[in-house]
Image: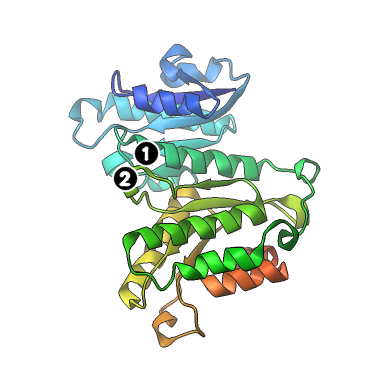
Amino acid sequence: MRCVVSTSRSEGLDGLLRIINDHGFDPILTEDMGAGSSLMSADFSDVTCAVAVLPEIDEAEHQATGLLAIYVEIGILLGKGIPLLAITGSRGGLHPALSSVAYAAVDLEDDDSLAFHLRMFLKTLSVRDATSAEIISREPAAQRVDLDATATSILETLDAGDRGSALQFEKQVVRLLSEVFGGVADNVDRAGGQDLGVDAVIGVEAKHGSPFFVVVEVKKVRGDRLTFRRALEQLAFYRQSLHADLGLLVFDSVGPPQPLWMVEPVEGILALSAVELIRMVAEGSLEQFLRRARNQAVHGA
């Protein structure tokens, strides 16, 4: 499987190419296929995905010819139906004309962020391409997970106030989600504890309907309304940039809903306490809950 890389850079690509290769793809630069409009006549057999690296804003020499060529190549790749991830760096978002393209506003030198965003992008591809025949029948989650032990492990992290407990909270929640949904691209073992934006992306596959995916943030907000609101807004940003169907915030409240959580809702973002999440997994209702929320978002409800 090949992954096309569109870029005007002549250096600084080693990390990106290595990461693409580490994920099982053979990276190939557009300059080796036919740069600019010449890409139209290239051989796209075995091409599964593409990554476009936009030049940084301060790279003046690339602003005219380089950026234009990349936009031409992006148009050709999209026209060929090839899923594409744009690396935008300090540019942030993309031009409105490219609103359907997933993007990551990360630096090429940041290997951890690049690797995570690429994992999330590839996970979305596997979910989007899933068919009912490809879905492996799974036992109910309650039969595969020791829910009592998992719940205890999660809840034990809630009272502790140290940074390590917050990371353990993330790991336990992502582990639970992994058991329910199978393969999960996660970020909880990040080097140096760096926050790369979201903690996981989960695919809800086609067993009971059309496949979709959810970006997940696990957060110990410790009763702070501002922290809670910022987590919702950050999740909304990554949901938009990755074109995820939903965002799910799992937070550390263990009691009934409090006035703290009665903040203005953020479109496409759900918030569940750890206790609510555990209850839904035990009842086998989590997938139905997410699917219903996704359908409501599609219909604008």
Q: State which quadrant residue 231 falls in.
A: bottom left
Percent position of residue 153, x then y: 53, 64
- Label 2 vs label 1, nearer the camera: 2
Q: Is residue 271 visible?
A: no
Please report contact status of discs 2 and 1: CB closer than 8 Å, yes or no: yes
Residue 86 place in picture, x, y as percent: 42, 37
Tell me the residue at 33%/41% (across/down).
106
Q: Secondary structure at mark 2?
A: helix
Q: How many marks?
A: 2
Q: Is residue 142 left or right of residue 67?
A: right
Quadrant in which the N terminus appears? top right
Asked if 12 appears above or below 219 in the picture, the reply is above
Q: Which residue is mark 2?
A: 192
| Helix, strand or loop at mark 1 | helix
Q: What's the residue at 78%, 55% (across, down)?
A: 139
Amino acid under disc 2: Gly
* Label 2 or label 1, whichever comes before in sequence order: 1
Q: Residue at x 45, y 86 (%)?
A: 258
Residue of label 1: 112
